[in-house]
Image: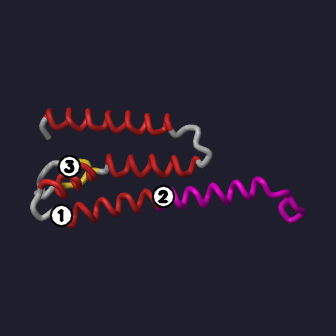
Amino acid sequence: MAEEFKLAWAVYAGGVVVLLAAGFWFMRNWSWSWVRNLLLLEAATVLLVPARGTSPDGPLTPILPLFVYQTVFEEEGATPEVAASLVFAAGGALAVMLIVGIITLIVRRRKDRPMTESDQF
C-alpha cells in the first residue's frame, strides 16, 4: 500500500474520530443514552468498515463513502457487493446494540427488584 494511501486513511480515521467525539459531546445530556449509543455505533460502523471497490485487488476504502461515490458517479450505481456490505455492517451494529440493550435491561430490572427468600441462596 502506498504511503499516500496510508496517510489518507489516517486523516480519514482521525476525522471520523473527531466527528464521533463531537457527536458524543453534543448528545451527552440525552435522557435516552441507548439512542445516543446506537447512533454513534451505527455512524462508526458505516464510516470505518472497509470494503473493496470494483476491482478485487484494489485497496480497501471506507464503505459509506464508497457506496455514495458509486451511487452518484458510476453509471450502474453501487455494486451489489458494496450495498450488501453496507447493509450487513449496519445490521450487525444494530444487532450488537440490541443484544447489549436487552442485557442492560435485564440487569437493571434484576437490580431494582426487591430480594426474596429464593434469591438468597
Which residue is disc 3 drawn over?
Answer: 60
Q: Which of the two labelled residues, at mark 1 and mark 3, occupies the earlier sequence position?
A: 3
For the residues bearing labels 2 and 1, Cβ distance under 8 angstroms: no
Specify the quadrant of the image occupied by residue 75: bottom left
The image's colour scheme reads secondary structure
Amino acid type assigned to the residue bearing label 3 in the image = Leu
Amino acid type assigned to the residue bearing label 1 in the image = Thr
On screen, 11 above or below 110? above
Q: Nearer the viewer, mark 1 or mark 3?
A: 1
SS class, disc 2: helix
Q: CA distance from mark 2 to mark 3?
A: 24 Å
In the visual, does 75 lie left or right of 20?
left
**Residue at 11% of width from left, 57% of height from top?**
74
Q: Is residue 54 magenta?
A: no
Q: Nearer the viewer, residue 14 or 77?
A: 77
For the residues bearing labels 1 and 3, Cβ distance under 8 angstroms: no
Q: Nearer the viewer, residue 100 or 72?
A: 72
Q: Residues within 10 Å of mark 2 (few under 14, many from 20)?
A: few
Q: Quadrant of the N terminus?
A: top left
Specify the quadrant of the image occupied by residue 57: bottom left
State the predominant SS element of the stretch in magenta.
helix
Q: CA distance from mark 1 to mark 3?
A: 15 Å
SS class, disc 1: loop
On screen, 37 above or below 13? below
Amino acid type assigned to the residue bearing label 2 in the image = Val
How far across and down, in percent of the image, does residue 24 sit?
Answer: 48, 38
Which residue is disc 1 drawn over?
Answer: 79
Which residue is disc 2 drawn over?
Answer: 96
How far across and down, in percent of the image, does residue 92 sit?
Answer: 41, 60
Numbered range of the magenta stretch: 95-121
SS class, disc 3: strand
